[in-house]
Image (spheres, rainbow, N blue to C red):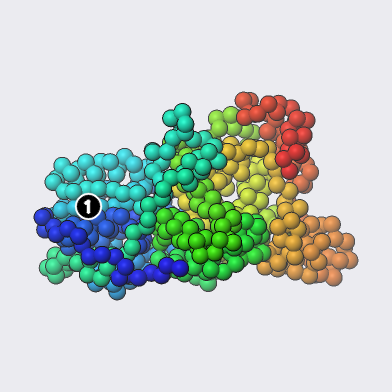
Amino acid sequence: MPRLSPHQGAAPKDSAADPRPSLVWFRHDLRLGDNPALWAAVNRGAPVVCLYVLDDETPGDWAHGSASRWWLHHGLRALADDLQRLYGQRLILRRGRGEQAVAALAEEIDAGGVFWNRSYAPFDREPDSRLKTSLREAGRDARSFNGNLISEPAHLRNKSGGVFKVFTPFYRTMSAQEVSEPLPAPAAGALPAPDAKLSARLDSLPLEQLDLLPTAPDWSAGLQATWTPGEAGAIARFEAFAEGSGMADYDEGRNRPDLDACSRLSPFLKFGHISPRQVWHWTLARIGADASIKEPAWAFLREIGWREFSYYLLYHFPTLLNRNWRPAFDGFPWREDPDGLRAWSRGQTGYPMVDAGMRELWQTGWMHNRLRMITGSFLVKHLLISWQQGERWFWDTLVDADIANNPASWQWVSGCGADAAPYFRIFNPITQGPKFDPKGAYARRFVPELNALDTKQLFSPWDAGPLTLSAAGIRLGKTYPAPIVDHAAARARALAAFASIKGAPDDAKTPEQIVEKEAQAA
């Protein structure tokens, strides 16, 4: 299995005809391996300046949420340490609009080349284009690269030349393409720093002045106990997953939150501590070493494909961020329910499987994907609270809150996104427990006040008799909340709401037809 090594790469292959320094702008690619922007600077053969800009202005509402900011702090420290240890390089930290900060530093050092890896967020595309034009007009080599996806969203088309709108044909086309080999980390000596005089006058904010960490209060203990941000942490996490039972059992184990069967690579991918190309090729290498894991390993790569599909949708449909992908849902009768939203966000709905997922999120900054579906379905279908409100909470509390995955997945579970059929499916928050947490280990971990109940009663404690509850030290509504909504009534209300949609994506027009279709899909 690959190990991080600063000595894998070749030395610069071109001597610089232009001796002016190169500027590398790190963005969602906080790594040294498989970093094409970094290699563009290496290949110029000139001194290199490395920059990160904390830009809270350009993204607007999609600036990093609280949990992501915690991760970013530690990810930047890891990158800065790697640059210093391996190359004697300093990571320059600045804040402001990325476009302006990069242009200013390029002028300050009279850069001969400025290189970065592309962002596919809608709000970044125009500023990136302006920046590239202005740098080139100033006589600088300005280039951007695909460092964060396997394939360029603009290049994949269906057989008729149109945009894919369904995952399966998209993935079939994407996975059939040749995936380029990931680049190694540059060799020692391949990133020469600028001369001492120039280096001394380059201002850089201390990491602590970016104010990324929570302080009043500091709620990050659970995150610190769970994660090791950085490139080394990403590779270690991949190796543990690939070499252990996680990848071998992935096709079955990935739905079991009580098992350690997930890769947990999502935050590392979000911040670019590892690239999808690395994950793809290293997984293929694992299959080559052990053909018995081929099927589950490809099930895992299919999840990488879903990430690609989310970015593809975002590229071609920028309003995916905050508007229904299916316009028919614009008339959906959402409810304003601040009390319900508060109970859901705090893991106090009275449904143990829902509450366990929401508490895992709060404690660790992450949630198992099966629980993301269960908790998301509960919010939008049991409570009829809009997916945008759920997306906002996840954006603030997930360490892997991703600009494409987050809205695409919320729209999928809500029924208004791409590939969302059957859109009327309503996850039963009671039966999902014994089905995917058969011994109750996951629910007991995050809802410990119910530990004394046996597994048959754990997921519907209100069905336990008063003597049983008393013996377990449980008082519903006191030590653990009673359900905030009745499942049967909420389900009927949701089905009626779906039946009210005009122009729904199938022929179900009445509540009775919806009920029949939902039963068939369950």
Say above or below: 491 vs 14.
Answer: above
Name the outermost residue toward the bottom.
85
Say above or below: 352 vs 123.
Answer: below
Quarter of the image for residue 455 reads bottom right
Residue at x-position 25% and y-position 48%? 143
Residue at x-position 46% and y-position 28%? 160
The amino acid at mark 1 is Val
Residue at x-position 28% and y-position 58%? 38
> In the drawing, does residue 364 fall left or right of residue 479?
left
Residue at x-position 59% and y-position 55%? 295
Can residue 337 be seen in the rendering of this structure?
Answer: no
> In the drawing, does residue 103 fall left or right of residue 465?
left
- Secondary element under disc 1, as helix, strand or loop, is strand
> In the drawing, does residue 251 fall left or right of residue 43?
right
Quarter of the image for residue 7 reads bottom left
Say above or below: 501 vs 275.
Answer: above
> Relative to the observer, which residue lies in front, 292 or 412?
292
Pinpoint residue 269: horizontal percent, then vertical percent: 45, 57
Can residue 421 be seen in the rendering of this structure?
Answer: yes
Q: Residues within 10 Å of mark 1 (few under 14, many from 20)?
A: many
Quarter of the image for residue 64 reads bottom left
Per the image, the residue denoted by label 1 is 114
Pinpoint residue 213: horizontal percent, then vertical percent: 43, 65
Pinpoint residue 176: horizontal percent, then vertical percent: 47, 45
> Relative to the observer, which residue lies in front, 429 or 412?
412
Q: Quadrant of the N terminus?
A: bottom left
